[in-house]
Amino acid sequence: MAYRRARHCTARETAGPGNRLSGEIPAELGRLTNLEFPYLQRNHLVGEIPPELGGLPNLDRLLLGQNMLTGAVPPELGSPPELTHLSVSRNLLSGEIPPELGNLAKLEELQLDNNLLSGQIPLELAKLTALERFRLDNNQLGGLIPAGLAELPQLALLYLAGNELTGCIPAVLLDVAGHDLDELGLETCQ
């Protein structure tokens, strides 16, 4: 990628989806403090997500889905105060979901689906009161579904299928009449 020498740039957006970009995401993108919309999905990006991206104060949307990114989701991604959309779906990310993502007060969409994420769904994600769309499907997550997810007031889409979750679906999630969920993707209890 051609971002290596960016020092005093005032860019608000990056290249865009599906531009056949390849290589690693340079950590230097974290120096572009005005960057709001790095659209980097549907490319051929490899390597780890630079934690420096979590230091972007104006970051609104971070779209890194449909690449070949590896490693863990950096906990620093729970820091950008303006972040409304985070998509790292359809990569090869592994490890646990960082509980720090629960700090994203303005987050409306969280897509972590189709990776190799393991561990439990962090209870801290129930603090995402602006969350409307939430995808964790097709990972290797285990444990119980946190009941607090049912209390997210804006939640309209929740996909958790294709994991190793145990226990039963919280009854509140099944009470569609009492909730604004439009789509609920779950498997039966184990």
Image (cartoon, rainbow, N blue to C red):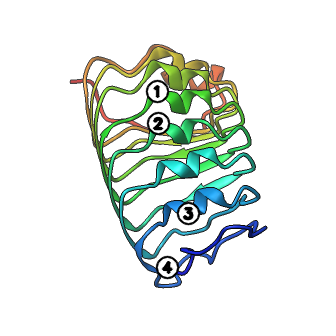
Kindly report the distance in space between the C-alpha atoms of the residues bearing marks 4 and 2: 24 Å
Kindly report the distance in space between the C-alpha atoms of the residues bearing marks 1 and 4: 30 Å
The amino acid at mark 3 is Glu
Q: Which residue is mark 3?
A: 28
Which sits in the foreground, 150 or 189? 150
| Residue at x-position 43% and y-position 55% | 49
Q: Which residue is mark 2?
A: 75
Seen in the picture, residue 129 relative to 107 is either above or below; the reply is above
Q: Which residue is mark 1?
A: 99
Q: Which residue is mark 4?
A: 1
**SS state under label 2:** helix
| Residue at x-position 52% and y-position 26% | 125
The amino acid at mark 1 is Pro
- Badge nearest the viewer, 1 or 4: 4
The amino acid at mark 2 is Pro
- Badge nearest the viewer, 2 or 1: 2
Kindly report the distance in space between the C-alpha atoms of the residues bearing marks 3 and 1: 25 Å
**SS state under label 1:** helix
- For the residues labelled 1 and 4, say whether their Cβ atoms are less than 8 Å apart: no
| Residue at x-position 46% and y-position 66% | 25
**SS state under label 3:** helix
Mark nearer the N terminus (3 vs 1): 3
The total number of labels drawn is 4
